[in-house]
Amino acid sequence: MQRLGKPEVLDGLRAIAPVIAVRGNNDKGKWAETIPERETVEIADVSIHLLHIIKDLAIDPKQAGIRVVISGHSHKPLLEELDEVLFLNPGSAGPRRFKLPITLAHLYLDGAAVQAEIVDLSV
C-alpha cells in the first residue's frame, strides 16, 4: 500500500486506473481530510475492506461478510488466510522502508474465488 503523502500521487494513479484509497498516518492537510480512514467495497462479488493500520480493524470481517482485508502501515508484506478471510499487506512499492523488500501485491478475483500474490520488486 503506497503512502499517498500528497494529492499528486492520487492524481497520477487515477490517470492509470480507477483508485480506491484510504488515508494513512502521514496523509495530513486539507486534501487528505476527504480520504476515508476505512473503506469497504464490493468487486466481482467479493467484499474487500481497506484500512491503513490492521490493529485498527474494529469489525469481525468474517461476520461482516468481508472476504479480503487490505492494510498497510508496517510496509511489511503479508499474505495470510485466517478463518476464511484473506489478510493482505502489499508492502511498499516506493522507496525502501527499513530493511524490508520493495513489494506490491496482485489480487485476483474470479466470482467469489480470491487469490493473491506478493511481488518482490527488489530482485
Image: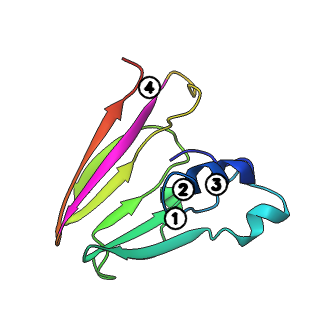
Q: Earlier in the sequence, mark 2 or mark 4?
A: 2
In this figure, which residue is indicated by the disc labeled 4? 101
Q: What is the residue that sits farthest to the bottom in this orientation?
A: 64
**How far separated are the C-alphas under marks 2 and 4?**
19 Å
Find residue 48 and report its image quarter: bottom left
- Observer-nearest of 97 and 115: 115
- Alpha-carbon span between mark 1 and mark 4: 24 Å
User: Which numbered mark, 2 or 4, is in the foreground of this view?
Assistant: 4
Real-space CA distance between mark 1 and mark 2, rounded to the nearest whole angstrom: 16 Å
First along the sequence among labels 1 and 3: 3
Q: Which residue is mark 1?
A: 20
Q: Which mark sits nearer the N-terminus, 1 or 4?
A: 1
- Figure colour scheme: rainbow
Comparing labels 1 and 4, the label whose residue is closer to the camera: 1
Give coordinates of residue 79: x percent, y percent.
29, 46
Which residue was labeled with disc 2? 53
| Residue type at numbered disc 2 | Ile
Mark 4 vs mark 3, foreground winner is 3
Of residue 62 and residue 90, the one placed in the foreground of this image is 90
Question: Residue under circle 3?
Answer: 10
